[in-house]
Image (cartoon, rainbow, N blue to C red):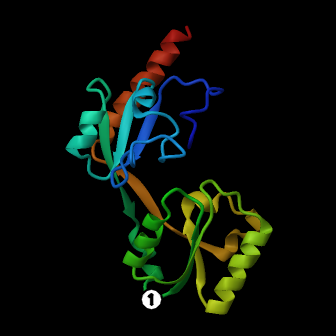
Amino acid sequence: MDDGFQNPTIYKDFSIIVINASQEFGNKRVMPSGPLRESIKRGLTRTNLVIVIGDTTTDLKKMIPSHIPIMSAKFIINKENKIFKGQKITAFAGIAYPEKFFTSLAEQGAQIVKEVIYPDHHIYHENDLLNLAEIANKTQSILVSTQKDFVRIPKSYRSLVNTLEGEVVFDNEELLLEILSNVVENHLTDDK
């Protein structure tokens, strides 16, 4: 669950923090001075596993207590996205750090004519899609968004939107599965 870590109403057996390696913990400050919702130290006291998307730096490793496993993963853009090469695109996103999404599209050879940024976790309404469709029509471009945004678009408008497809690939998927299997097994044993 995205952003469930800080929600005290959700019971947690196991907590995972996912860190974007290019951002790490930002300026390491709590809102409104920085991007964090709580101090690093406090958050890590409730963490069972850290997953770093990208390359883990030595500085990042030093911030994470040695008893917390750190796993690395990469977000890989699917090759099928080459269909965007040379296409005029109106790209829109309601995610944290949408610049990475726009950069990924450009790296696929897309010609981005308009970038539209919505707040993180934006729930799309009919007017949003009508405005986006108007922009795409005026610029003779196609609408492209993230897979994460796509599920927040009203079903009746999803046929207008393409997505940049990708997947998270873990450096050691077997270890991740072993860790998660142990958590499930321990939970099932505790319930008996």
Residue 97: % across, % down = 48, 59
Residue 27 versus residue 158 in the image, above or below: above
Residue 56: % across, % down = 26, 46
Q: Element type at marker 1?
A: loop
Q: Name which residue lies at 37% across and 61% down.
A: 76
Residue 10 versus residue 91 in the image, above or below: above
* Quarter of the rendering occupied by the C terminus: top right
61 vs 38, left or right, is: left
* Residue type of the residue flagged with mark 1: Gly
Considering every residue shown, the one lying at the far front of the view is: 33
Q: Dot 1: within a 10 Å radius of its alpha carbon, few (fewer than 14), some, or many (20 or more) residues? A: few
The quarter of the displayed image where residue 173 is located: top left
Residue 130 versus residue 93 in the image, above or below: below
98 vs 137, left or right, is: left
Question: Which residue does the numbered mark 1 point to in the structure image?
Answer: 86
Comparing 157 with 96, the one in front is 96
Residue 12: % across, % down = 55, 25
Q: Name which residue lies at 62% across and 59% down.
A: 119
The quarter of the displayed image where residue 63 is located: top left
Residue 46 versus residue 175 in the image, above or below: above
Comparing 92 with 41, the one in front is 41
